[in-house]
Amino acid sequence: MYLFLACVSDDKGLSFYGDQAIMDRLSMDQQVLNKARSGLIKNSLIAWQKPVYQVLSLEPQASIRDGSFMNLRDILAMGGTND
């Protein structure tokens, strides 16, 4: 659902797709949509005020093992390097 909203949102992260349109395109029912939306909101990935969704920035930070922080862009740029 996050990827779908990110793909259909405008330059401010806003998407005006309604619940039914999202359910139709992602082949999900209302219960699955509600659970997905709640999880995304809980993790500060989206904001929602019916009928508008907003994809929130993944920055500023994603935590790494030593307790310091890095941009998600930098983490992804590291590829699959593991310690």
Image: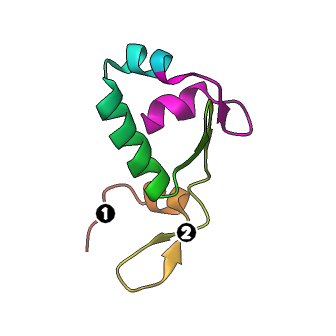
Residue numbers of the magenta segment:
1-19
Q: Secondary structure at mark 2?
A: loop
Amino acid at circle 1: Thr
Whether residue 15 is in magenta: the answer is: yes
Residue at the image point whose x is 46% and y is 38% from the top: 2
Say above or below: 69 vs 36. Answer: below
Amino acid at circle 2: Gln
Q: Secondary structure at mark 1?
A: loop
Q: Which quarter shows the N terminus?
A: top left
x and y, in percent, of residue 36 in the image = 37, 41
Q: Nearer the viewer, residue 66 or 25?
A: 25
Mark 2, other Cα within 10 Å: few <14 / some 14–19 / many ≥20: some
**Residue picked out by circle 2:** 61
Left or right for 29, reference 2: left
Whether residue 17 is in magenta: the answer is: yes
Give the quarter of the image for residue 64: bottom left
Q: Residue furthest right?
A: 12
x and y, in percent, of residue 67 in the image = 42, 85
Q: Are marks 2 and 1 in contact (CB under 8 Å)?
A: no
The numbered dot on residue 81 is: 1
Which circle, 2 or 1, is nearer the viewer? 2
